[in-house]
Image: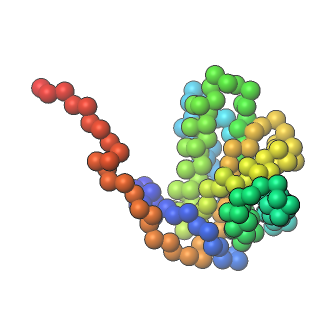
Amino acid sequence: MIEEIIRRRSIRKFRAEDLTKEQVNLILESARVAPSAHNRQPWHFVVLTKKQKNEVADKMIEVVTKKQVKDMSILHTAQIIKEANCLILVFYTNPSKEDTRDMDQQSIGAAIENMCLQATKMQIGSLWIGNTYIIKKELEQNYFPSGQLVSSLALGYSNQEPNPRPRKEIKEIVTWMEEEL
């Protein structure tokens, strides 16, 4: 598994080849079996393809062009969504549970990471997307009214091979608190 962890990249350019439903279901299966705090499994996934995913991208573009949001990176993200084969919307199923929210959000993160790693293993590109937040209420209302949109994931065959991004050295991010024997 360390190979997939090292090879995983955020893909922003996709080829115009369709994934099969079986491939997407295998990626979703990796999310289904992700660890979750107290086994709550606080997630729900909605898969959008073709027209529906493009409508999401168009709505994102509309929000920016009407100057409701000034973040121009959203336009780039919308184009990525249009190029991708599918877009998986990730919803939190227990948004009213304030006492478990932090643990549940971590669990959802584990499910999304599992999908990214499974996609990498299958030589499928993925991009974990946060910019769909700008149309969050509309996506919730249209696709999963009882949940709260957390994130989304674009999938497709990669049309790029990005270099690894710089990472901090292990000594910069780890402190060992060892007791002497």
133 or 72, nearer to the observer: 72
Give the residue at x 46% y 60%.
4
Report x, y in % for residue 134: 76, 51
- In the figure, is residue 55 to the left or right of 164? right
Report x, y in % for residue 157: 62, 71
Where 55 sits versus 162, above or below? Answer: above
Where 105 sits versus 165, above or below? Answer: above
- Scheme of image coloration: rainbow
Report x, y in % for residue 152: 69, 53
Residue 157 visible in the current orientation: no
Q: Looking at the rendering, in which quadrant would you find the N terminus? A: bottom left
- In the figure, is residue 97 to the left or right of 60? left
- In the figure, is residue 71 to the left or right of 123? right
85 or 136, nearer to the observer: 136
97 or 86, nearer to the observer: 97
> In the current view of this chain or complex, which residue is farthest to the left?
181
> In the current view of this chain or complex, which residue is farthest to the top?
99
Number of callouts in the render? 0
Give the residue at x 65% y 55%.
129
